Image (spheres, rainbow, N blue to C red):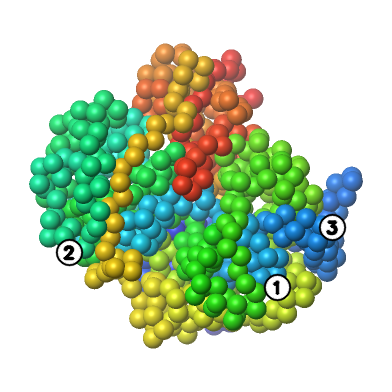
Amino acid sequence: AAGRERLIQKTKTVCTYCGVGCAFEVWTKGRQILKVEPGQGPANGISTCVKGKFGWDYVNSPERLTTPLIREATGFREASWDEALDLIASRLEGLRAAHGPDALAFVASSKSTNEDIFLVQKFARQVIGTNNVDNCSRYCQSPATRGLSQTVGIGGDSGTIHDIEQASLVLIVGSNTAESHPVLATRVKRAQKLGRTRVIVADLREHEMARRADQFLRPRPGTDFVWISAVCKFILDHGLEDRAFLAARVSGLDEYRESLAGYTLAFAAQETGLPAATLEALARQIAAEERVCILWAMGVTQQCGGSDTSAALSNLLLLTGNYGRTGTGAYPLRGHNNVQGAGDMGAMPDQVSGYQKTTDPLTVQRHEREWGVTLRPERGLDNTQLTDAALEGTLKGLWITGEEMSLTDANVNHLARGFEALDFLVVQDLYFTNTARYADVVLPAAASLEKEGTFTSTERRIQRLYRVMPPLKGTRADWEIYQAVAQRLGAGWNYTHPADIMAEIARLTPFYAGVTYERLAGHGSLCWPVAEDGTDTPLLYTERFHFPDGRARLHPATYKPRASAPNTEYDLHLNSGRLLEHFHEGNMTFQVPGLAGKVPDTFVEVSPELAAERGLQSGQWVRLVSPHGAVRVRALVTSRVQGHELYLPMNARHAEAAVNRLTGSGGDSQTNTPAYKDTSVRLEVLPEVGDN
Ligand code: SF4
């Protein structure tokens, strides 16, 4: 037994699924995962959800890529790492020489470590000389980052999960929290059960959190901005605002008050379908509460006015003095394990690490010293601009790291045409993904359990992950791959361990100034901003907002009507989102038999009313058609959705059922985040029933 014990390793890692940032010990024997044991994680303690506990078999899936692939006229052939890396270096160099650095673009993965991501944007900027770099926050929380940057100065959660638990009121808008951020939802449910916290949910769909809420508001699709602004107007009109807080800490009240002129309760009731009396009671309640936290996610941000609605939620917190104290603040919930880190690390077309603008003289100077190049001031292409640039011929080469863009971008049929127009596409991933089908070179990447590094969770909490097992033979960590190509292009990178990269991040990034691997040892963690002496900041804005004068700014209200309201041809509203058992497009979780067995494929939720109207039963095949494409899925009749609203999970086992065959290219005007949630379709009932 002692010998057996010796073969068993226990290694700390951080979950690679959602942004809650659960940490745990993984028990292994060789590559066999024996169990996952939570206990000391600062975000989760003894909790995990089903994905964190059982969702790891993907790392040993027979589908893992273990050798680079190069496209030939007849298909892909296996290649050595040297051959693949030489080819990438020479093609990138050739395209840059012929068309300039902006003919190339790079997509970082929000599932990679901070160190991996930092090097992707460094590669783009220092080695190639372009700002064409982005990450998948473009598809999700960029509008929240924008709305918060405009109002309080920092585009991250105001406090920690502990703070949310201390709120007397938690308002959740457009977030399926129990399925998308399960452990965080458990905390909210516990605070509610203890009688400490009331929970109000505003959403289209009556998901678990909505069913458990003390109050459930069901506004019409795309109208959150209107009811939030009407609540703010009512608060101001009736003198319910926190005047002392506003006078001491907030600017722009007069202009903001004026901008609200049209947002009467009557207007809001007409637009949103929520009764004026309900909105009045809500305004009075929020104003009277001691401590309010607002949580939101894709239901808010994946809309045409996602940034404005995020700013409106922040305005509501400012008006009622709900920033800077424990149990208060704004919490845009980050979807991927390290999407917060991807933004922090500067995988964005206009900012380097720590949200420093490429136009800021101090930032430019600091990078000149460290990297020996001058940052270019022009904004680069973001993810949503890549397709048109490829079709117009200005973008020639693209390197995608760990993103299944051909399923997760909006309007994927259009995107596929863009991929086909490229001269050179590199895809780096765990599996031969749907996106890899378009590649010229496919590189096998290491999984998080095989890597050292750090992730930053939705709490701005930076945590270390240790190598649970060596990389599967033939795979490499992202940072090693980028370094190998950088060296071939003469960049002289010489990192020997991710800790070297973190040291550089700390030198270049004021928010990470005091982050070291030693300070993060074991289950240690730090919430940024981290001062040079290692002091971190779990709760923001206790004394100052993040503007030069220390004052927050109320953001004036403007109304953006929906882009694609249902019409006679496309008469149904289509919503989309996650399921508890699967993550994102499902590439990893469908490789886990225990999870795939529970939910083997996607389906569309149809209301009992609509089912009766169309003579439809659960299990029947339907075809959903939008102006952009069509999918065929089975129907599930459920009262979670109502009337002419549908819900199609984004976790599709087969690319043919991907919701983004239906979504359009329009989006939030400030961030280009696609308006995934603003999709209209028609439904055709297919004659067959059952498996066909
Ligand atoms: Fe992982 Fe999120 Fe589940 Fe925690 S709640 S175990 S971070 S998927």
Q: Could you say whether the residue bearing mark 3 is in a helix, strand or loop?
A: strand
Q: Residue at coordinates 72% horizontally, 54% vertically from top-left?
A: 103
Amino acid on which the number 1 mark rests in the picture: Gln
Q: Which mark is residue 78?
A: 3
**Residue 345: in sight, yes or no?**
no
Task: Tell me if 475 is positioned left or right of 531 in this view.
Answer: right
Mark 1 — residue? 483
Q: Is label 3 or label 2 in front?
A: 2
Q: Is residue 373 above or below residue 236?
A: below
Q: Residue at coordinates 54% horizontally, 42% vertically from top-left?
A: 651
- Residue 117 at x, y percent in the picture: 58, 66
Q: Could you say whether the residue bearing mark 2 is in a helix, strand or loop?
A: helix
Circle 3 packing at 10 Å, graded few (<14), some (14-19), many (20+), is some
Q: Could you say whether the residue bearing mark 1 is in a helix, strand or loop?
A: helix
Q: Is residue 177 above or below residue 187?
A: above
Q: Earlier in the sequence, mark 3 or mark 2?
A: 3
Q: Earlier in the sequence, mark 2 or mark 1?
A: 2
Circle 1 packing at 10 Å, graded few (<14), some (14-19), many (20+), is many
- Distance between the alpha carbons at the discs numbered 3 and 1: 22 Å
Residue 687, image quadrant: top right
Mark 2 — residue? 248
Amino acid on which the number 3 mark rests in the picture: Glu
**Closer to the camera in the image, 354 or 244:** 244
Q: Residue at coordinates 49% horizontally, 56% vertically from top-left?
A: 336
Amino acid on which the number 2 mark rests in the picture: Ala
Q: Earlier in the sequence, mark 3 or mark 1?
A: 3
